[in-house]
Image (spheres, rainbow, N blue to C red):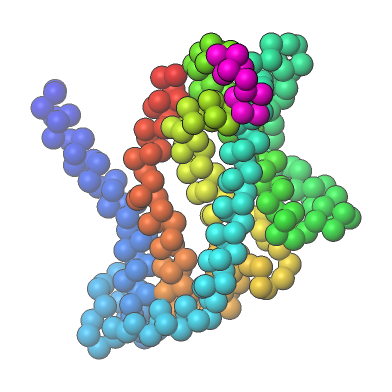
Amino acid sequence: MDRKFRIGWPIFGTLLGILFLSPFYIVFTNSLKTQKGIFINVMGLPTKEYFTLKNYTQAFIELDFIRSFLNSLLITASSTLLIVVFASMAAWMLVRVKSKLSTFLFFLFAAAMLIPFQSVMLPLINIMGKIGFLNRAGIVFMYLGFGSSLSIMLYHGFIKSIPVELEEAAILDGCNLFQVFWYVIFPLLKPITVTVCILNIMWIWNDFLLPQLVINRPGWHTIPLKMFYFFGQYSKRWDLALAGLVIAMVPIIIFYFIAQKHIVKGVMQGSIK
């Protein structure tokens, strides 16, 4: 029985891996073909007759990739930075201040994670529109609100493992609360901060629904939003559409491979703590 499992699981894992990777294979190989080459053989590798790299050049220009990339980078970096700063400070106070109010606020943040975005998006956009906040600053503010709950939960569990004696010693040395947090507590939060950053970066970078509702100027489009309009424009030109899709996937794939070990390490340390 054990031998069957030892032989069967690798085979099952290989087949499952092939199944999950097959869409990437189809997208990448067909992005290197002409339109005629795609229609002749979708699953095959590009032949010399139908091989081309012009798809990427044209898609890069039409996608306005540099501007879209910078928009995504600005929104993602700003939102993640604010989430890290405010969530870590809020979690620290919720852990250290023992009161019914802090307990209530903690469970309130936990309950907020259960509320689907779709149930609040229309009232939210209505309110933001009335105060003139349907812009890049507004979307960063909204990401701060939606991303804080999970981040506070992660920080809260980690901070409970930090001895309060470290803070008391810093206060005796003359530090105020601001200095205690930034010079004593925050450096100790590096493992969980890396996890919080990675999870929020991948979520915000790939998010489509909120930018579609908030961003109403072509020059502000993020990569997912620009890709949506680009793919709709070139839906009949599968060669350009697929090349644009590959270009749009490259930044997050590179980031994921760089950061994947930190995701596992941070989550494990947070759970142990």
Q: Residue at x 51, y 23 (%)?
A: 158
Q: Residue at x 80, y 56 (%)?
A: 133
Q: With 27 as the anchor, is 86 left or right in this view?
A: right
Image spot of residue 217 (x, y percent): 72, 71
Residue 263 in view: yes
Q: Nearer the viewer, residue 254 or 180?
A: 180
Q: Residue at x 66, y 73 (%)?
A: 219
Q: Is residue 157 magenta?
A: no
Find the residue positioned furthest to the right.
130
Q: Nearer the viewer, residue 148 or 3?
A: 148
Q: Residue at x 51, y 73 (%)?
A: 65
Q: With 247 as the anchor, is 196 left or right in this view?
A: right
Image spot of residue 214 (x, y percent): 73, 59
Find the residue positioned furthest to the bottom.
49
Q: Main secondary structure of the magenta part?
A: helix
The quarter of the rendered structure image containing the C terminus is top left
Magenta extent? 169-180
